[in-house]
Image (cartoon, rainbow, N blue to C red):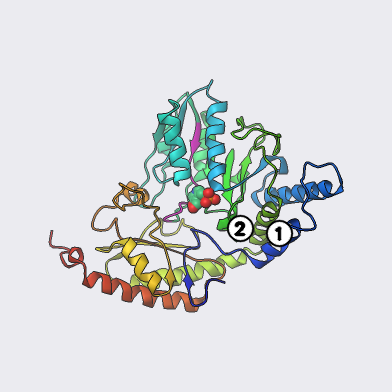
Amino acid sequence: MAERDLIYLDNAATTAVDPRVLEAMLPYFTEQFGNPSSVHRTGIQARRALDISRRSVAEGLGASPEEIIFTSCGTESDNLALRGVAWACEQRGRHLITTPIEHHAVGNTLAQLQSRFGFQVTEVPVDHDGLVDPDDVGRALRDDTTLVSVMLANNEVGTIEPLEEISRIVHARGALLHTDAVQAVGHVPIDVDALGVDLLSLSGHKLHAPKGVGALYVRRGTPLLAMQTGGGQEMHLRSGTENLPYIVGLARAIELATQERQVLKRVQQLRDRLVEGVLKEIPDVELTGHPTRRLPNNASFVLMGIDGESLVMQLTTSGVAASTGSACSAGSGGASHVLTAMGYQDPWVRGSLRLSLSRYTTEDEVDRAIAILSTGVKRLRSLSPLYAQRGAA
Ligand code: PLP
């Protein structure tokens, strides 16, 4: 799928569009180009395609069609969920709860609600595996807490959070629960009722649909203030002419993920092969994230005495696309906020590596990646004074 000879192990960043998804989308650029709000035949055809897509996405989540709002991406879904609920419920309270390991789409939105709009935000801790303890959420809840946002699966280390338990505790205190499920949808079965969430964000490009389309599940009756106002599309919660070809693509990708769940088992076996190979071939490396409660396609590590960025560059020149797992920002010194929250420190925390697989990853690619990684790590460590001094402190 990827560029020839490139071993693409960065599917948590983005995935290749499935050719069947593209095929489903194409007619909506040309013959079926209508605006779903138009009343003539072309518009009615477009409306029908929009309704069918909404039904497919809802089915994939165990939701009802009127609970699905299409957006432009996971970031927009997170922004709408957080600001939309915070502002709709502010008469009741201005306290919000989250975790320190959220994607910046959640973290920075809550930070802005706090710094510019006077909301109070409490972060509950995570343990060394990146897991939230539901009792910590219980202890953080107050009478004025309106919303709790805990991601379903972490984008760096793949840990899957105990949303079911968290939702019972949150609802017992009358608050609402949002989850950022951008990394989870398409990779683990999702049922919004079983999870007990009131809002759930997802994004197309993490599950073989294109970039630029997402959705927000909003449980019926959940108070939500629209962030984008205009013509009243998407149940008046997200105005703007719907991006129909991309919405059709998202729906097709969710259908395929649901119909082809057996693929996940194969991906998980390959991931396990990758983890075992890395741990066997390379000394001073640790798997990060929970050993079992994790996404089936995620293999993330810390490597002692290595700079993750340098390793990723080295892998690129050897034909492997990988990631440090963190979007390093200026001033962070390259340390991931997720690993830091999990208690990682120097000389481990800077040596993060995330390898993420997809349905297109092959066994041969996994084996070659292990060999390339082992050689690259050896080379970098031979140049690293930090690694030479290990154990000396
Ligand atoms: N949330 C998580 C957990 C993510 O991993 C990402 C993207 O990497 C996003 C939100 C943002 O999604 P998008 O790229 O569709 O805006």
Which residue was labeled with disc 1? Answer: 25
Residue 220 found in image quarter: top right
Query: From mark 1 to mark 2, how far is it between C-alphas?
Result: 10 Å
Inspect the image, locate mark 2, and give the three-letter code of the amino acid beneath it. Answer: Pro
Residue 111 vertical placement versus 286 (above, below)? above
Q: Which mark is residue 210?
A: 2
Residue 122: x and y in percent read 40, 33
Expressed as whole percent of the image width and height from the top left, the position of residue 83 reads 53, 33
Residue 188, visible in the rendered structure: no
Q: Quadrant of the N terminus?
A: bottom right
Indicate whether residue 154 is drawn in magenta: yes
Horizontally, residue 320 falls left or right of residue 67, namely left
Q: Secondary structure at mark 2?
A: loop
The disc at residue 292 is: none
Determine the residue positioned at 65% across, 35% down: 237
Judge from the rendering whether residue 306 lies leftward or rightward of residue 146; answer left or right.
left
> Which quadrant would residue 290 be assigned to in this image?
bottom left
Residue beneath the point at 24% across and 55% down: 346
Observer-nearest residue: 246 or 166?
Answer: 246
- Element on which disc 1 rests: helix
- The front one of 192 and 313 is 313
| Amino acid type, label 1 | Met
Which residue is at 61% across, 63% downward? 17
The x and y percentages for residue 300 are 40, 61
**Crowdedness of circle 2 by 10 Å Cα count: few (<14), some, many (20+)?**
many
What secondary structure do most residues of the magenta stretch adopt? loop
User: Are circles 1 and 2 on residues that touch, CB within 8 Å?
Assistant: yes
Q: What residue span does the magenta drawing correspond to?
A: 147-157
| Magenta region includes residue 186 | no
Query: Does the numbered disc 1 mark a residue whose Cβ is under 8 Å from ligand 1?
Result: no
Q: Residues within 10 Å of mark 1 (few under 14, many from 20)?
A: many
